Amino acid sequence: MKRPVEQAITGFAWLSMAMLLFAVFSVIGYLFLKGYPSLDTRLIFGDTAVLDALLLRKQVFNGLFPAAAGTLVLVVMSVVWAIPVGIATGIYLAEYASARVKGVLNLFFDILAGIPSIVIGLFGFALAVFLHKNFSRAIQPCLLISSIALAFLVLPYLIRTTQMALEGLPEDTRLGALALGATKLQNIFYVLLPRSLSGIMSGVILAIGRCAEDTAVIMLTGVVATAGIPKSLFSGYEALPFYIYYISSQYTSPEELLTGYGASIILLAICIVLFSAAFLIKKRLTYIAFYRS
């Protein structure tokens, strides 16, 4: 009686995996099928020479280079703000918080994870208005405000993955260094964190993807259609998610819509580069932690 049930469950699991893979490859394949014909240097750099654009000698007005650069800078800044706070909070929840405090904070972070991104964007906009009125007229929706808002958006992912990675370690791993006389802080930095790097980096990768795709936050906190390369933290910027949204909702010709598919492929390529960088950093940190004296 058990065997037919087990076979049915196994079959359903395989079918679910196949459906998921089919959906993923269908979306990516359709994207490349539609966007590949529009991919060329003119789409990215417009009428500006490639070398002049890369060296920032001339501004690109009719290409996606400023949006790609703005997206890359925005994602990196957001993750840089979020990583120290998220990992430190995850360590506190896993290793230091009492059961009562942990329960309260877990509820708070679950609520934070469920807040719609448009609300986070509205918070960022309100923060910019508050700073503009009370501190400096030069402060307005900008790259810095957007990166801070996105950091708040992805904090629950980093906190949860860090906490789960640390709490999921075997008991002998957790107690071995302590039994040999290490302090709790030494145990965390030299044993627990290196052993949980894979789980923590999974949170970082989720954060990168969340920052790269969000449109609602950046629309309210600083993205501008023709801002060019961001000149400072307090300037406007361009971003690929906003460009894709704008083109898909207000295109005037099929050729213009194709540039939206091309922009989607470029955004996907940026995410792949950032994911690969996170993976290489994880491998390097693992090597330093386990194989270097």
Image (cartoon, rainbow, N blue to C red):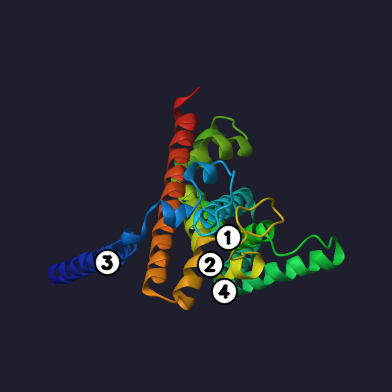
Q: CA distance from mark 4 to mark 2?
A: 17 Å
Task: Identify the residue under disc 3.
Answer: 26
Check the image and name the residue furthest to the top.
293
User: Whole-percent x and y of residue 28?
Assistant: 31, 62
Q: Amino acid at mark 2?
A: Phe
Q: Earlier in the sequence, mark 3 or mark 1?
A: 3
Residue 242 is labelled as: 2
Q: Which residue was labeled with disc 4?
A: 116
Q: Amino acid at mark 1?
A: Glu
Q: Label 3 is placed on what type of residue?
A: Ser
Mark 4 or mark 2: which comes first in sequence? 4
Mark 1 lies on a secondary structure that is loop
* Residue picked out by circle 1: 238
Q: Is residue 184 above or below residue 251?
A: above
State the CA–CA distance, disc 3 to disc 1: 29 Å
Q: CA distance from mark 1 to mark 4?
A: 22 Å
